[in-house]
Amino acid sequence: MTLWLNSGVPSPEVARRAGHSVDVLLKIYAGCIDDGAGEANGKIDKALAD
């Protein structure tokens, strides 16, 4: 599941395939999901440079 989440599959789709609600999925896998801070910072930096 974490591979799917970290590769960008939307949480609702992963939850559906796993037979969970999104709430349960994120509670179970919250500590394993890449928070994407580096990617978010890159997007912010790019927006500020424009």
Image (spheres, helix red, strand yellow):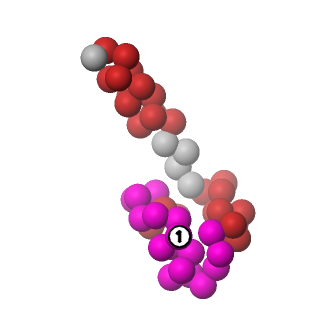
Query: Which residue is located at x 51 percent, y 82 percent?
Result: 17
Q: Is residue 19 left or right of residue 38?
A: right
Q: Position of residue 32 (x, y in %)?
A: 60, 57
Q: What is the magenta range?
A: 6-22
Say which element carries label 1: helix
What amino acid does circle 1 point to?
Answer: Pro
| Residue 48 found in image quarter | top left
State the residue in front, 12 or 27.
Answer: 12
Q: Residues within 10 Å of mark 1 (few under 14, many from 20)?
A: some
Q: Is residue 50 left or right of residue 37?
A: left
Question: Is 24 situated above or below 34?
Answer: below
Residue that numbered label 1 is attached to: 12
Q: Is residue 32 left or right of residue 23?
A: left
Q: Position of residue 8 (x, y in %)?
A: 40, 58
Question: Is 28 situated above or below 47?
Answer: below
| Residue 46 found in image quarter | top left
Magenta stretch holds residue 19: yes
Question: Is 39 situated above or below 4?
Answer: above
Q: Position of residue 31 (x, y in %)?
A: 66, 54
State the residue in front, 31 or 15.
Answer: 15
Q: Quadrant of the C terminus?
A: top left
Question: Is 37 situated above or below 50?
Answer: below
Magenta stretch holds residue 18: yes
Q: Position of residue 12 (x, y in %)?
A: 53, 70
Query: Which residue is located at x 46 percent, y 64 percent?
Result: 10
